[in-house]
Amino acid sequence: MVTPQWPGVDPDWSRTVSVKSTSAVDAPGTVRRWHLLDNAAELSRRGLVPAGTLLCVHGNPTWSYLWRTLLAAGSDPAHPWRVVAVDQLDMGYSERTGTFRRLADRINDLGDLTDALDLDGPVVTVGHDWGGAVSLGWALAHPRDLAAVVLTNTAVHQPSGSPIPPALRLALHPAVHRWGTTTSDAFLRVTHALARPALPAEVRRAYMAPYRGARRRAGVGNFVADIPLGPSHPSFGMLSAVAEGLRDLQVPALMLWGPRDPIFSDRYLKDLVGRLPHADVHRFEGAGHLLAEDRDIAAPIFQWLGERNVARAGEPPASDAALAPEEFRPLWNQLAEHAAGPAASDLAVAEMSPEGAVSRSLSWKRLDRDITELAAGLREAGVRSGSRVSLMVPPGVDLTVALYACLRLGAVVVVADAGLGTRGLSRAVKGAAPDFLIGIDRALAAAAVLGWPGRRISVRDLPAARRRLLGVETSLTALARRGAALGSDRRMSLPDPEAPAAVLFTSGSTGPAKGVVYTHRQLAAMRDTVARTFGIGPGARLVAGFAPFALLGPALGAVSVTPAMDVTAPRTLTARALADAAAAIDATVVFASPAALRNVLATQDGLGEAGREALERVELLLSAGAPVPGPLLAEVQRLLPHASLHTPYGMTEALPVTDISLGQIQAADADAAAGTVAGAGHGVCVGLPVHGARVAVVPLAADGTAPGSDPVTEAGVTGEILVSAPHVKDAYDRLWLTQRESASLPGWHRTGDVGHFDAAGRLWVEGRLAHVVTAPGGVVTPVGAEQAIERLDGVRLAAIGGVGPAGTQAVVAVVETVPPTRTAGPAAPGLAGQVRGAARQAGVGVSAVLAVPALPVDIRHNAKIDRTRLSRWAARALAGGRPGTP
């Protein structure tokens, strides 16, 4: 063969091997010629001893070229591994055998090759597409040599009730199959078009090179024809054996996935995770079928190999020493005690109607009974411990009952709300891959249109025609009736405290929303932290304008009411709705986001005397989700004159982390203005750590990163904020790389926020690590300057961003004016001068000032500014083009 000239491939890797075949389709004594890409000679030449071998198996219609980045990475002296990337027979540059080779033959063929190469352990199989099934078949047949398995976008089983992907159905159709896969190169071109972004022309030509001419594409057509569509197919038995064999495979496993794959979608990932539940999983949002082309998979694979000590086969994994956990009290402990005690007939939960009256309510005894009955009905319907249940029900009685019923069963509740937007919500639901979806009509309609996974359950009974249209199997109402009919045999054991209990999604304000996994113990720890920090417990009466607190109320033993609002749009909370809810339960505690508070203040003229009196009886107000300016709180204080106002700082991964009251904010601001406390100022003071939490920072480097490994708490040192607490999340869901980064400092969660401590030990938040500007004079964090600018008359919100190359970025201020400017663009000279002066007082030099009608904020909180998007827009605006609005 002519010395290959394939982009990214060292010509010395290319070799051919003659292998004696033992496959049934070949006559005895047949020898087959295999083509490989193998870096063994390079490693030997450089004196590098490999830790083991990666056996990489491509799918259809690719070839060993798919794995070129692994070959290059395996040749790195920092982590030498032999990488053997095979061209399966009839594929790539291997021999065209003229025989139809089925799955069993291909697994056997691969065994013949590894025998000829004298390949022994430790071996890590790496498979993609139908190469995944082949590589796993080899893995199951060679347990002594196997050290680990790596999979990218593949499948070993067709999930029941799921059709074969349309692209494969078309390729298998008798009228299309031969022309689409063999006579023409259509199948190859369609596959290459799945790359995101598009393949460079020279890479596309390299993929096409071994398949020029119909005679060289016979294997492509045969591979497609060997896809088992049912039990009668000749390869069905072998694929089923591989699929079932995985359940007993105990070696480390890594799954890297491109969710935008029209062939091997998330439903196949879900099936694989069910068979290899111990696997580490990372979904690369935006990536598709050709994951190795869309993303760098070499770096994470070799990181994973090192961290899992894969080369040291047989050695037990190292484990961190852990403190003995506190006694576990499940999340519903207080709820159950109330239901069985003197308060059994007292009000537990309520929800408000738009007219200002209580529309539904339950006593503690009735709440506990409804939860128990629904749990029994859900169990009868197939919900089990570990089942994932997506809850798409607005906060209120129905959501409270459904949530606690699922938790009692040990099911994992998936909470992704409409505040993520349609695209974000759809991405979240598909990524979480729920087994069941419980929703209101609107959510069920979206599930039907957008193809969300999960067996569907409505909240209320639906007419038969609508039930069929939405694909609904049953309803919560019907399941509760069934649970009640089961009688007294409804006892349920406590779930494993360390088992997953919930997947809660972040706001998506700094990228695609991430699923955050909490165990039962961590949810209980969150309850206990809130109770001890804020004194919320039995006897408290809570108005919850924020979904997490609406659900946490019963766990705290507090009476909870949901005001008449759309909790996924905080700006919909009016002063009257808040007052009506407070009056309904004689509220002592209110939780509302900053955006909700702004609208409450804007609509307070609609309050009557009774409403004002109800708000005057509130004793505690909590507001979180975004920084809460002191002036805003001061206005709220006049509306709730007897309330202690607190703004806990936290995130979906750990809530709360610190806490501060209005009085403490004012004291911190005074310290900053007077300069009497070192480190005070330049950011939002969020106070001291809550009960059981530790907080530190990793200092920032000149390039805006936080590369260190030594947490510090010295005053005035700006860095990435770290938190350690019993209620910090367990992991990110199917985001192994993200979890690895967030836990890269043992014992700490890296928040991605930036801040510093003052000499009094208070934490000041300065922004997000991703939003740090790297100007010529050093790093610039945004929040301090933004706060100074927002104190100006005529400025509602401000954002600081960077434009230009890293290290030489120009600092740009973008302001939302009052009244709103008509068009986005350069600010008026007078306003620009005021903005520059305010920023200068905060220690930031601003190069340009732009004004916009409205800053882009997240949907859930209506407050978190998308500074990355804003910086891109500012760059266009300053370049003189027509940037439109951000």
Image (cartoon, rainbow, N blue to C red):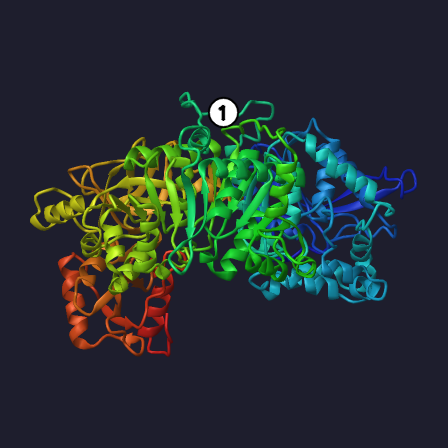
- Image point (36%, 51%), residue name: 545
Secondary structure at numbered mark 1: loop
**Image quadrant for the N terminus?**
bottom right
In the image, 87: left or right of 314? right
* Relative image position of residue 91 (x, y in whole percent): 76, 52
* Nearer the observer, 788 or 604: 604
* Relative image position of residue 550 (x, y in whole percent): 41, 46
* Nearer the observer, 430 or 647: 647
**Image quadrant for the C terminus?**
bottom left
| Number of residue marks | 1
Which amino acid does the dot numbered 1 rest on?
Ala
In the image, 62: left or right of 811? right
Q: Is residue 38 visible?
A: no
* Relative image position of residue 347 (x, y in whole percent): 41, 41
Farthest-out residue, right: 27
In the image, 19: left or right of 155? right
On screen, residue 632 above or below 658: below
Q: Which residue is mark 1?
A: 318
On screen, residue 699 above or below 261: above
Report crowding for label 1: few under 14, some 14 to 19, many 20 or more residues within 10 A (C-alpha).
Answer: few
Q: Quadrant of residue 40?
A: top right
* Nearer the observer, 792 or 747: 792
* Relative image position of residue 380 (x, y in whole percent): 66, 38
